[in-house]
Image (cartoon, coloured by chain):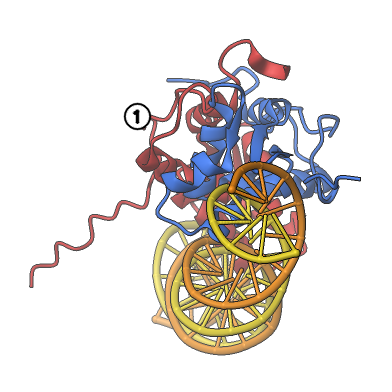
Chain colours: A blue, B red, C orange, D yellow
Amino acid sequence: MPKQVTPLPHTVLGEDTPCCPPLAQQRLPAEVATALAPAFKALGDPVRLQLMSMIASAENGEACVCDLTPAFDLSGPTISHHLRTLREAGLVDAERRGTWVYYRARKAVLSQLAALLASGGGTTAA
Amino acid sequence: MPKQVTPLPHTVLGEDTPCCPPLAQQRLPAEVATALAPAFKALGDPVRLQLMSMIASAENGEACVCDLTPAFDLSGPTISHHLRTLREAGLVDAERRGTWVYYRARKAVLSQLAALLASGGGTTAA
DNA sequence: CATCTAGGTTGACATTTCTCGAATCAGCCC
DNA sequence: GGGCTGATTCGAGAAATGTCAACCTAGATG
């Protein structure tokens, strides 16, 4: 039985999380805030934000760690740590194929976060 | 030595920041990621996320600290600290009127962040 | 001016986060 | 099997963060 990369269902955030009444439309319950904050926190680091963008904008919708790592002036373990953070926040999925590991963005989750921040319809852009 | 050292504008995020090509559409430049990450980091705490929601969803578009503080099981200084973090991240504005201080959400900035996370094209959930 | 209240600032502490080197695990190829 | 490469995990140290108690500032009111 080949053990795959999918480690812990630590995920915190799934496609079904009740997260999406826009933040500016009604007050966010404490438990929802607690569930969502880790996702924003994961994006709150320049390196992870770039990683997220590289993964989300990759050609086939997935990016190899071997391509991500050399894009930064950081050690392999450090990049691996940041990727794990993104994974545990539910923002990306990882899959091992042969020697390489590929990361894929969970666009549904990103969309949920976007919907949360979107101003329901007020002073959007001045 | 001339004290020219300080230009460090911790504002980080203004309405004119070039932040908005969706994250999944093209790779985020390092400097943009560095400019935007603090905003996400600011939202990456449950208390601040709730504060942000309370402010953004407030009746007149603004919320008094005197209403925000008692909503949490935290000391005044702690709430003040979180509000300052939101302010320095460019997510809210503060205004003093008489005895009280009111916070107001910068919806344009929130919209920018939302646009960044929104899957630009059709690739929303596939 | 004295005093009271609403917020903010300072200083300190415990916890977490970021980063790396060393070790380990997972596949490939000779 | 033995060795090689890619990626993760482990352990540790420096830096940042969340929280509070104590103190200070801005306005209002007597």
What residue sits right under mark 1 in the picture? B16
Q: Quadrant of residue A97?
A: top right
What residue occupies the far right of the structure in this picture? A1
Rendering coords of residue A98 (x, y %): 70, 39
Foreground residue, B7 or D15?
Answer: D15
Does residue A5 appear in this view? Answer: yes
The residue at the point 84 percent across, 51 percent down is A8
Foreground residue, A80 or B40?
Answer: A80
Is the residue A80 above or below the residue B108 in the image? Answer: below
The crowding category of the residue bearing disc 1, from other C-alpha atoms within 10 Å (few below 14, some 14 to 19, many at least 20), is few
Q: Is residue B16 left or right of residue B25?
A: left
The residue at the point 42 percent across, 30 percent down is B19
What residue occupies the far top of the structure in this picture? B122
Is the residue B23 above or below the residue B37 in the image? Answer: above
Rendering coords of residue A113 (x, y %): 67, 32
Rendering coords of residue A33 (x, y %): 75, 45
Q: Label 1: chain?
A: B
